[in-house]
Amino acid sequence: MVGKQKENLEQAISYYHEALHVFTVEAFPRESRNVHLRLAEIEAQHENWDAAQTTYKAALKAEDLLVILGTGTLGRDAILKEGGDAAIRLGYALHRLGHINDAAVAMERGRARGLAEALAFDAADPALITDEERKAHYRTARANLVQVQADLHAPL
């Protein structure tokens, strides 16, 4: 990168660091996660892998807090909707730093968390829902989710 683009990215890094003084993980976990992800992407563009991996770890910390504060599923829904898979991107940054084992662990932790949440969702018992309208809505929503997941994993 040269010239104006490099200058703009460096200025963006500075602004994101300033934003993180306001959007702390503890006070604003969603905003903090988003800023950390954007900052990490810029660091990765600069091939500053050490800063990128540190920043992705901070985004994951915010994700963990969002899941806790969002009573699990709601927090995870927010993370999924906003995208930016921090665990996979952290794994890539660690790989670029030569930390192959740590990269594999980071990616597997992200996958394991998703699997654990999917299993918890699968364990939900619609028979416990006493309101018939809500029970029907739950079953329809779950069937739609299962179909979408199957479509996503279908061969191209």
Image (cartoon, helix red, strand yellow):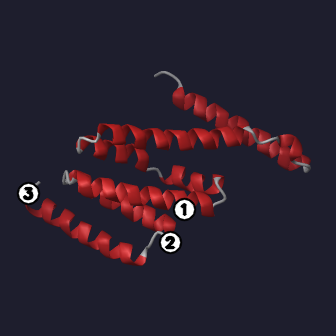
Q: How many marks?
A: 3
In space, the residues marked 2 and 3 are separated at their CA atoms by: 37 Å
Q: Secondary structure at mark 1?
A: helix
Q: Secondary structure at mark 2?
A: loop
Query: Residue at (78%, 44%) from the top-left corner?
Result: 138
Inspect the image, locate mark 1, and give the three-letter code of the amino acid beneath it. Answer: Leu
Q: Nearer the viewer, mark 2 or mark 3?
A: 2
- Can the viewer see residue 35 in this picture? yes
Q: Nearer the viewer, mark 1 or mark 3?
A: 1
CB under 8 Å between discs 1 and 2: yes
Inspect the image, locate mark 2, and give the three-letter code of the amino acid beneath it. Answer: Glu
Where residue 106 appears, as percent x and y from the top left, is 41, 44
Where residue 60 appears, as percent x and y from the top left, is 45, 55
Query: Residue at (59%, 57%) from the top-left corner?
Result: 67
The disc at residue 116 is none
Say left or right for 109 vs 116: left
The disc at residue 65 is 1
In space, the residues marked 1 and 2 are separated at their CA atoms by: 8 Å
Where residue 34 appears, as percent x and y from the top left, is 42, 62
Q: Secondary structure at mark 3?
A: loop
Q: Earlier in the sequence, mark 1 or mark 2?
A: 2
Say left or right for 130 vs 114: right
* Image vertical order of residue 65 relative to residue 99, above or below: below
* Image vertical order of residue 91 relative to residue 63, above or below: above
CB under 8 Å between discs 2 and 3: no
Pointer 2 residue: 26
* Image vertical order of residue 110 relative to residue 30, above or below: above
The disc at residue 2 is 3
Inspect the image, locate mark 3, and give the three-letter code of the amino acid beneath it. Answer: Val
Closest to the observer, 8 or 116: 116
Q: Quadrant of the N terminus?
A: bottom left
Say left or right for 147 vs 92: right
